[in-house]
Amino acid sequence: MASGDLALTILGFLDEEPMHGYELKQRIAELSGHVRPVSDGALYPAIARMEAAGLLERHEEEGSGAARRQVLSITERGREELLRRLREPSDVEISDQARFFTVLAFLSRLPDAEDQARVLRRRLAFLETPASFFYRGGRPLRAEETPDPFRRGMMLVARAVTAAEKDWLRQAISALTRS
């Protein structure tokens, strides 16, 4: 998981509820661990950087045994950063599907439906721009123009996924703008 994605994920989960590091790691793994696992060597330094930046704070609580545990919670500054990142995702957070899904996982934290719809419109505009995995003469190739059966399969699957996502985005934008 890229460090920017990790920070967004940490802020998003802690905005839902305070939790200790191990619990946070489990939640991150449930969201994307099978695709992009997060190691302790990435998670705990990210938490320390975010705590130093004033985005998170920690306090001790009684543990289940004799050991006390460190519980993390988001600060007001962290919440402002979360909302800013959700309102204004980077271009790569819009264009990369896994990163967009990270944004999408926490988009409901934005209180304004118009802000949510604006992010979805950006993703839809990206998906509506002609693109391909393969190009000839600067022009994107269509699956039907690709003789390699595996590349054609890759392109057909991507086309179907994109069509389903565009349909969902249009429905979600419509529902958000009606409310």
Image: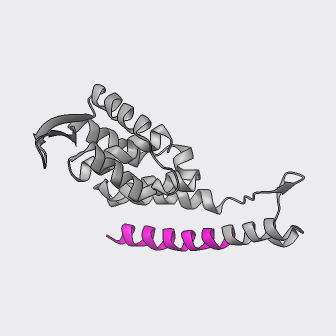
Q: How is the image coloured?
A: one colour
Which region shows up in magenta? 159-179
Please name whichever residue, 130 or 67, is drawn nearer the observer in this view of the structure. Answer: 67
Residue 60 in percent (x, y) is at: 13, 37
| Residue 174 colored in magenta in the image | yes
Please name whichever residue, 89 or 28, is drawn nearer the observer in this view of the structure. Answer: 28
Side (left or right) of 3 relative to 78:
right
Q: Where is 141 relative to 160, above or below?
A: above
Side (left or right) of 103 relative to 11:
right
Q: Where is 68 relative to 26, above or below?
A: above
Residue sitting at 25 percent across and 49 percent down?
15
Side (left or right) of 130 relative to 64:
right
Quarter of the image where one finds residue 80 = top left
Mostly what secondary structure, the magenta segment?
A: helix
Please name whichever residue, 85 or 14, is drawn nearer the observer in this view of the structure. Answer: 14
Residue sitting at 14 percent across and 36 percent down?
59
Residue 109 shows up from this direction: yes
